[in-house]
Amino acid sequence: MKIPEWQDITVEMYQHIYGINKSDMSDIDKFLFTITFLTNKTEAEIDKISLRTYKSLEKQLVNIFTQLLEPKGEPSTELQGLEVIYDFKYMTLGRYIEIQHFIKSGMEVNLHMIGASITKGLTHSERADIISEGPFLPTMLSVAYFMKEFAKFTLQYKGLFGIDDDSDEVKPTGDFNERYGWIFSAKEVSIHEGIPLDAAFDLPVIQAFNDLAYLKSFQQYQNELNKKNEKL
């Protein structure tokens, strides 16, 4: 009886294991449910294994998860035949917001959704299904690399955002934006560009963020001007 290696574990399988280990089960139950799932055995079959087999499975499980501490491999240019886009020149405002939503909802449970957001071709839903059925490790390495680049890109515009040090989530700042967030920001961009709101989400994120930076600077200038006028 063997635990499969990472090349044989899909994204969907990993997410199932992740769900088990995030549950309120005892550590023993987490282990038993994990090996039951990975070995494709029933609980009754696992209950009948010898102590020697149990110890062997425990060692194998520890070994494969230890490998995740220093995973071997590089980010891929393709995931299941889908081209991966790492260059932010090709990212839209809508895609950026979409990825932020998936991060906020949980990167592990949304690994396939983030993978779909950084690839192209077909629909988002179809890409997510394909990636979900593909090997976990290449997806994890690619998404992890992208998330580092995502954080670097966001920091270039940190003046626009309130960044919580304890979270990867980034959100627009300001009292009004605290309530209306990205939709308000997209509307401001659409007015500035003279385009419909839907079209604003299709703008390159760099262009949209530069628009927001300009609008914020202009608002600050107007506020300073108003303060000076009030003193006259």
Image (cartoon, grey):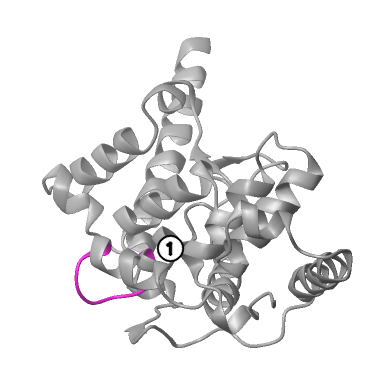
The percent coordinates of residue 150 (x first, y second) are 54, 63
Q: Residues within 10 Å of mark 1 (few under 14, many from 20)?
A: many
Q: Does the magenta run of residues contain 113?
A: no
The percent coordinates of residue 229 (x first, y second) are 45, 17
Which residue: 41% across, 33% down? Answer: 219
Q: Could you tell whether 102 is left or right of 93 in the image? A: right
Q: Nearer the viewer, residue 203 or 67?
A: 67
- Residue 38: quarter of image: bottom right
Q: Could you tell whether 79 is left or right of 136 in the image? A: left
Q: Which residue is denoted by mark 1 in the rendering?
A: 112
Residue segment shown in magenta = 117-124
Q: Could you tell whether 14 is left or right of 96 in the image? A: right
Q: Amino acid at mark 1?
A: His
Q: Nearer the viewer, residue 64 or 57?
A: 57
The percent coordinates of residue 163 (x first, y second) are 62, 42
The percent coordinates of residue 13 (x first, y second) are 52, 64
Depicted 44 relative to depicted 229: above or below? below
Which residue: 40% across, 71% down? Answer: 133
